[in-house]
């Protein structure tokens, strides 16, 4: 690590070189004068000088040893490179590897010829292999035979023409595990460059459960479309999520026009302007006005025509998210109301008639009993209606 003048610490790379200086060696220096070595005292001075030199040598023994290893004319040259960006890239690559290795989605990387150069643990778990069994092998080992025989041709064609079949897209294919079992998978393939070489990265998602859900939805769709009663499903804010064919026939809208629209589209204005308030109140208080009941309402067709309807609304909640869906079954009761009106008119007419009137079905069950009949036979209508006509006979 290095530290700049401002105190900033940064990673660095240091390359150290050793060399010798160009100064003169001791061999080129003139010898000292004799008097510097012997002195005026002659031999005795020389002896004293020798003893002092020996003592000095003993005191600096370690220093002399070091100096004998590293000569005075040695120089060290250091080359320094700021490694900040390299360090960041290294850390980024380490974090990337940690993320990929811990990802729950299988990921594989192959070269131009289909050889697997990387696989994360999730890929090994999904296909039933240890990672060392995958690396260096051809990606075809993870495909059924009918797909594997074509794969080399796809890669060769792409190398020659650049024409893409799967690269850059997401497609559903079959995968094959180490035990030979097959499963439906969704594969997303992207092209990348690593150290100047082309690589292909594939992300694999097992869609077996998704397909089961789709199948169930398709079956449900068929069932609802065959149902003769209009059915509408909406979310908590009134947005229509699903309708059946009977709804299309009853209201005159296409499925595309209905799905995503607000349920108020099927209501008269005086009802529609209150509907959001009902939903908001239910979300806030849980107090039900229509949910869980059957009520008569007025509905509106695409052409503006109004008609009497009977609606039954049930609630369903997603077990994971808690999001609620409301499903309503709508019956056009226009004809029923007309019949009820006709029956009431007939009943009033019968009650006003001075002649006793009795109606019954083919089995003799009394269906109506007029006021004049009640006066004649002495029975209250409630005692007779639903009974056999024989009660009025001896």
Image (tube, rainbow, N blue to C red):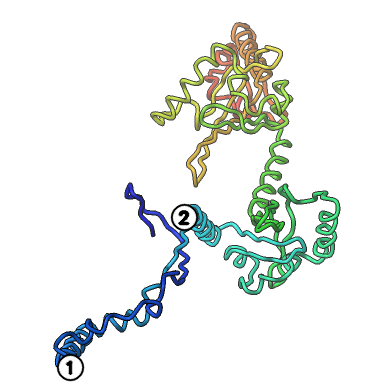
Residue 268: horizontal and vertical position, in percent?
59, 13
Counting residues from the N terminus, which is met first, the one under dot 1 or under dot 2? Answer: 1
Nearer the observer, 389 or 251: 251
Mark seen at residue 43: 1
Please tell me how crowded label 1 is: few (under 14), some (14-19), or many (20+) other residues with Cα within 10 Å: few
**In the depicted structure, whether residue 322 falls above or below residue 334:** below
Mark seen at residue 394: none
Label 2 residue SS: strand
Determine whether, in the image, residue 282 is placed left or right of residue 65. Answer: right
Nearer the observer, 159 or 348: 159
Residue 88: horizontal and vertical position, in percent?
48, 54
Q: Residue at x 42, y 57 (%)?
A: 11
**In the depicted structure, whether residue 60 falls above or below residue 198:** below
**In the depicted structure, whether residue 374 falls above or below residue 249:** above
Q: Which residue is mark 2?
A: 82
Determine whether, in the image, residue 187 is placed left or right of residue 159. Answer: left
How many marks the image carries: the answer is 2
| Any part of residue 16 in sight | yes
Residue 104: horizontal and vertical position, in percent?
55, 58
Q: Residue at x 32, y 81 (%)?
A: 31
């Amino acid at each position: 690590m290095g530290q700049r003048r401002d105190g900033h610490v940064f990673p660095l790379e240091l390359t150290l070189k050793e060399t010798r200086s160009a100064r003169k060696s001791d061999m080129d220096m003139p010898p000292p004068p004799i008097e510097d070595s012997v002195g005026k005292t002659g031999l005795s001075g020389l002896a004293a000088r020798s003893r002092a030199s020996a003592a000095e040598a003993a005191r600096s023994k370690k220093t002399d040893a070091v100096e004998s290893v590293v000569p005075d004319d040695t120089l060290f040259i250091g080359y320094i490179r700021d490694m900040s960006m390299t360090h960041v890239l290294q850390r980024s690559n380490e974090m990337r590897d940690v993320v990929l290795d811990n990802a729950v989605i299988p990921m594989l990387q192959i070269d131009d010829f289909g050889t697997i150069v990387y696989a994360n643990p999730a890929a090994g778990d999904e296909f039933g292999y240890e990672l060392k069994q995958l690396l260096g092998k051809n990606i075809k080992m993870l495909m059924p035979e009918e797909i594997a025989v074509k794969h080399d041709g796809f890669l060769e064609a792409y190398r020659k023409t650049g024409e893409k079949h799967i690269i850059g897209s997401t497609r559903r294919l079959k995968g094959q595990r180490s035990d030979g079992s097959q499963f439906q998978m969704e594969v997303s393939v992207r092209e990348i460059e690593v150290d100047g070489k082309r690589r292909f990265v594939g992300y694999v998602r097992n869609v077996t459960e998704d397909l089961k859900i789709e199948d169930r939805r398709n079956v449900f769709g068929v069932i609802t479309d065959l149902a003769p009663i209009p059915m509408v499903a909406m979310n908590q804010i009134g947005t229509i999520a699903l309708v059946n064919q009977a709804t299309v026939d009853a209201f005159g809208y296409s499925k595309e026009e209905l799905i995503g629209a607000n349920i108020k589209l099927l209501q008269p204005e005086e009802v529609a302007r209150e509907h959001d308030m009902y939903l908001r109140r239910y979300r806030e208080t849980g107090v039900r006005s229509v949910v869980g009941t059957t009520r008569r309402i007025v509905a509106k067709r695409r052409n503006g025509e109004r008609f009497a309807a009977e609606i039954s609304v049930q609630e369903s909640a997603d077990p994971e998210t808690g999001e609620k869906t409301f499903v309503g079954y709508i019956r056009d009761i226009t004809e029923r109301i007309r019949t009820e009106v006709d029956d009431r008119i007939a009943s009033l007419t019968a009650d006003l008639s001075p002649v006793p009137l009795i109606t019954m079905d083919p089995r003799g069950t009394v269906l109506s009993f007029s006021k004049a009949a009640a006066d004649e036979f002495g029975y209250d209508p409630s005692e007779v209606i639903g009974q056999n006509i024989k009660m009025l006979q001896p």
